[in-house]
Amino acid sequence: MNTVELITAKRNGRELTEEEIRYLVRGFTEGSIPDYQMSAFLMAVYFRGMSRQETIWLTREMKLSGDTADLSQIKGVKIDKHSTGGVGDKTTLIVGPLAAACGVPIAKMSGRGLGFTGGTVDKLESIPGFQTALPVQDFFDQVNGCGIAVIGQTAHIAPADKKIYALRDVTATVENLSLITSSIMSKKLASGSDGILLDVKCGSGAFMKTEEDARQLAELMVEIGKADGKKTMAVITDMEQPLGNAIGNALEVREAIDVLRGQGPRDITELSIELAGRMIWMGEQADSAEEGLAKAGRALRTGAGLEKFREFVAGQGGDPDVTDKNRQDELLPVSPCTRTVTAPRDGYICSMDAMGIGLASQHTGAGRQTKEDSIDHGAGILLHHKAGDQVKEGEPICTLYSSDEARLETAAGEVLRSVQIGDAEPDLSPLIRCVVE
Ligand code: URA
């Protein structure tokens, strides 16, 4: 087989065979196909697309490019959850403990943040002492003992995706249905859980800007998950504006704890119960989604989810007292330089562009520009208002936190560009758009 011929075939819109896709994925992973040829191939895919069948083969080859986690030592029906990426999305920190408190084992591998989106591993590492790199046996023991463990994804899971994603990131080929599907599902299918709940984000702060595109992505991912023998379901949710009020690692940990106390913002509380409820159903701890949602709500109200969070943090080396309001300032970092951004006029906040707010948070130091950048765990944004709220000129919209005073100016400018204020009360889209099963 010849790489140039395969690039030409895709450039001309031909459907590739399973063998041809295998040749490309294996060749690139092993190093016999260079970056420049893979880049050309990815751009051809970007413009020509891939069929459903090609996407299934691509996902399978990427999954088989590394190890497949064997979680058989963990008892019960293990359910994973994945968000396609958003701003202020700290649901794993809430949903994991809620589902685990209801008997669903959570053995999760999570990623770090890049660009304007955050990552669960960075958020957890803002808790002093929290270990996200556990030896395999400790990972299994923690899930069997406490019901939940979250670790960073190892380099052995879907290494083809790691190499391909790094190339997509710098060749403007991220936003393609087949490439996103194969990237996410190859990792999820290699991670070994029995079921996967996908939170497919839709809106300005998501890869998929429209509900139609998000639905297509969700349907393809669900089909591929099921074809691999996993229970798979997707919830399409709004990402026009950030989720919750906190953006930035330690700030998000505080907000997740507030939600588990029953004192969190309404949007993230609603979404967390929806996701946890579905995981409880998928994990066979409820006979229906409705019963799962009721159980998740009860775990929140009774404090069982908060107690599970404390056990989870302690089990991975962190101080469980991060849940104690009186000790949070001492235990969780807060960056020392602050700036309040105020409303430039009276009116209603008609929109709060999630991507812009994510970029502003990145400017404070809470996010990375490149994979090698270090992050400021105490940096970020606390929103005092969201889209739909009425504000007066000069009223605080948000507070920015950074360790570097100079960063606040750029971040504040980005926030002001992201917030539109108008005279009429806006019509906002619902947070939970639909479910794909
Ligand atoms: N997240 C991934 O892991 N891969 C993508 O392609 C997009 C989002």
Image (cartoon, rainbow, N blue to C red):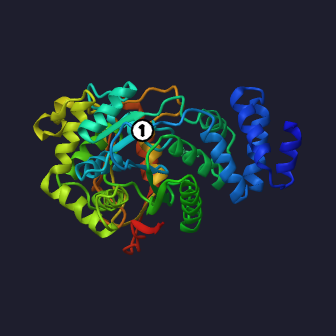
- Residue 33 vs residue 74: left or right? right
Q: In which of the image's four quarters is ligand 1 placed?
A: top right
The picture places residue 417, in percent across and down from the top left corner, at: 47, 53
The picture places residue 274, in percent across and down from the top left corner, at: 33, 62
- Residue 380 vs residue 155: left or right? left
Location of residue 130 with respect to 389 vertically, above or below: above
Residue under the image location 18 percent in, 60 percent down: 298
Count of numbered marks: 1
Displayed quadrant of residue 138: top left
- Asked whether 214 or 380 is in front, the reply is 214
- Residue 302 vs residue 266: left or right? left
User: Quadrant where the N terminus lies?
Assistant: top right
Residue under the image location 49 percent in, 51 percent down: 84
Query: Which residue, given by chain and number where applicable, does mark 1 sit on?
Result: 71
Residue under the image location 32 percent in, 54 percent down: 244
Location of residue 219 with respect to 97 vertically, above or below: below
Residue 148 seen from this side: yes
Displayed quadrant of residue 375: top left
Displayed quadrant of residue 127: top left
